[in-house]
Image (tube, grey):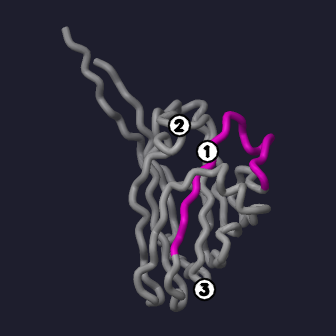
Amino acid sequence: MATIITTTYSANTAITMDLTSLAASSTFLAGRESTQIDNTSNLFIDAIVQGKFLVGTTPTLPCELRVYVWGADTSLGTTAIDTLDGTDSAETLTNTTVLGTLRLGAVVGILVNTSDLTYRVLPFSVAQLFGGILPKFWGLFVTHNMTAALKTDAGNTNSFSYNGITYTST
């Protein structure tokens, strides 16, 4: 009798991170971190992250939005990575070497200098960024260099979410 491995996706889960009016950072050191995601009870093998954001007033080209991912074996509530502490908050990293401790999950190039356009962040694997293993605790750090802040959005356009992945054998 053959064993069959099936991939199972969790329900789409919102990542807590308020990107409303996120200011630009020419060095990508200032941005917004998400609330940490605790994988110690779900035990997902991977998490697929996707998102979208609304540009503000006439972005200055060339520019981009970057999504970094951090991972840790302990909660950032007890052990911070530089200024990242696992809570939804505006953060400014102390220097560019800190960016080297994070994993770059996505870069979205802004193609036109038109206000109020929605851009999508295509799905990416968190585990792949960490050598194929999803960390016990992880989260996002989002930053951009568009000169103008992201659009204030009451319609939830500025948002990220994930689907956890497990394998089932039958």
Does 22 appear above or below 103? below
Q: Quadrant of residue 153?
A: bottom right
* Secondary structure under the numbered disc 3 in the rendered image: loop
| Observer-nearest of 41 and 56 | 56
Relative image position of residue 11 (x, y in whole percent): 41, 45
**Which stretch appears magenta?**
64-82
| Observer-nearest of 14 and 165 | 165
Does 87 appear above or below 61? above
Tell me which label, 3 or 1, sits earlier in the chain. 1
* Amino acid beneath label 2: Leu
Q: Residue at x 46, y 52 (%)?
A: 49
Does 102 appear above or below 159? above
Relative image position of residue 104 (x, y in whole percent): 54, 55
Tell me which label, 2 or 3, sits earlier in the chain. 2
> In the image, 8: left or right of 164?
left
**Which residue corresponds to mark 2?**
134
Q: Quadrant of residue 111?
A: bottom left
Q: Would you say the residues marked 1 and 2 are in contact, meaning their CB atoms lie under 8 Å apart?
A: yes
Q: Residue furthest top?
A: 1
Which quarter of the figure is the C terminus placed in? top left
Q: Measure the alpha-carbon separation of dots 1 and 2.
A: 8 Å
Q: Would you say the residues marked 2 and 3 are in contact, meaning their CB atoms lie under 8 Å apart?
A: no
**Which residue corresponds to mark 3?**
148
Is residue 159 in the magenta section?
no
> In the image, 31: left or right of 167?
right
* Amino acid beneath label 3: Ala
Assess disc 2: are there few (<14), some (14-19) or many (≥20) residues with their C-alpha within 10 Å of its C-alpha. Answer: many
Q: Residue at x 66, y 65 (%)?
A: 32
Q: Residue at x 71, y 50 (%)?
A: 86
| Observer-nearest of 162 and 105 | 105
**Which residue corresponds to mark 1?**
138
